[in-house]
Image (cartoon, helix red, strand yellow):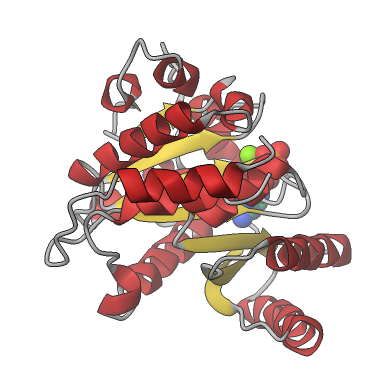
């Protein structure tokens, strides 16, 4: 799609959503990482459950190409995926699956690849579909695959907020920096707010040091501010919960990691209102940002 920018400008001109600034919209949070296996999918399901426990409506989008981590962690085999919406035989609300705790998710499946090759009509259709989620969700949490790919960068552009997960391992920190740098240089739009979770850490002190190192290089070399969202201690119960296909916050609610996930959700929901609540009608335009490159 060579002239995508022109197409997008046309879409915005032709289809202005009804904007009612008084009603809050869903907030899109993309969870990503430079290195694989750092804990993105476990974070997404546990943040979803903890947000739900605080009375928030959440829909997860599993945007991991091929690996489909969310359905495995939640023990639900999805009947449909995003491809069914893109090809037109289902609406987005029809493909939402729910586990026994009421955690809702959409399987990206082969639809994630298809998203990279949509024409103008299909982009409008997809944007309208995502905008439908405004009616039912306070938060849309997107789980991505690791690394620098067009799909990951697109899901970062789609978000109001991007959470980068790193562990204290040096390779995880340098890979997180590489992804943040690519995202910044690739974006000709307002960057979403960038937040860091340090996972599998020995202590909160170690996590804060990791954040400081990463924040310093981002400030020095990219002139970019990144925020600290919190840490999750290394906890074997995360693996035990994954084995029985339940979020640790359900199986071991008093464990160290569950406590940390709840603290992160408190921080997320305590954000100042302006940052916390995008206005209604915002999701349609937000989706178009996703296609502003590639
Ligand atoms: N805080 C933690 N303490 C101990 N183990 C953890 C913690 N967080 C995640 N893990 C373990 O790390 C592994 C990877 O976790 P997860 O699948 O959530 O990572 P991911 O970033 O989604 O991986 P991928 O890049 O493959 O999608 C799993 O075995 C999980 O049980
Ligand atoms: Mg994963």
Residue 266: quarter of image: bottom left
In the rendered view, would you say 102 is above or below 38?
above
Residue 24 percent coordinates (x, y): 19, 61
Residue drawn 63% across the image and 65% down it: 188
In the rendered view, would you say 36 is above or below 203?
above
In the rendered view, would you say 249 is above or below 245?
below
Residue drawn 31% across the image and 70% down it: 276
Residue 12 percent coordinates (x, y): 38, 50
Q: Quadrant of the N terminus?
A: top right
Residue drawn 14% across the image and 60% down it: 20
Q: Nearer the viewer, residue 176 or 274?
A: 274
If the picture is divided into quarters, which one holds ligand 2? top right
Residue drawn 45% across the image and 41% down it: 247
Left or right of 45? Residue 136 is left
Return the residue found at the far right. Answer: 171
Q: Nearer the viewer, residue 137 or 266?
A: 137
**Is residue 109 visible to the viewer in this orientation of the structure?**
no
Residue 171: quarter of image: bottom right
Q: Quadrant of the C terminus?
A: top right
């Amino acid at each position: 799609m060579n002239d995508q920018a022109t197409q997008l400008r046309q879409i915005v001109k032709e289809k202005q959503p009804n904007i009612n600034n008084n009603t809050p919209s869903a907030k899109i949070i993309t969870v990503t990482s430079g290195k694989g296996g750092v804990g993105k999918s476990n974070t997404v399901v546990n943040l979803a459950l903890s947000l739900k426990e605080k009375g928030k409506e959440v829909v997860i989008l599993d945007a991991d190409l091929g690996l489909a981590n969310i359905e495995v962690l939640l023990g639900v085999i999805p009947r449909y995926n995003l491809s069914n919406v893109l090809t037109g035989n289902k609406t987005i609300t029809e493909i939402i699956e729910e586990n026994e705790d009421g955690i809702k998710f959409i399987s990206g499946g082969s639809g994630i690849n298809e998203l990279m090759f949509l024409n103008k009509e299909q982009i409008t259709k997809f944007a309208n579909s995502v905008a439908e989620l405004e009616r039912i969700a306070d938060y849309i949490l997107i789980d991505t695959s690791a690394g620098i790919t067009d799909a990951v960068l697109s899901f970062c552009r789609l978000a109001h907020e991007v959470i980068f997960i790193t562990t204290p391992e040096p390779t995880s920190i340098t890979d997180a920096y590489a992804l943040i740098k690519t995202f910044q240089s690739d974006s000709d739009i307002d960057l979403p707010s960038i937040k860091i979770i340090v996972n599998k850490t020995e202590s909160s002190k170690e996590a804060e040091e990791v954040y400081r190192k990463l924040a310093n290089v981002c400030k020095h070399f990219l002139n970019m501010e990144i925020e600290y969202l919190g840490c999750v201690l290394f906890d074997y119960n995360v693996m035990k919960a994954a084995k029985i296909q339940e979020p640790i916050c359900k199986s071991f609610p008093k464990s160290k990691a569950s406590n940390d996930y709840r603290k992160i959700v408190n921080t997320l929901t305590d954000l100042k209102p302006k940052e916390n609540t995008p206005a209604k009608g915002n999701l349609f335009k937000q989706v178009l940002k996703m296609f502003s490159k590639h």
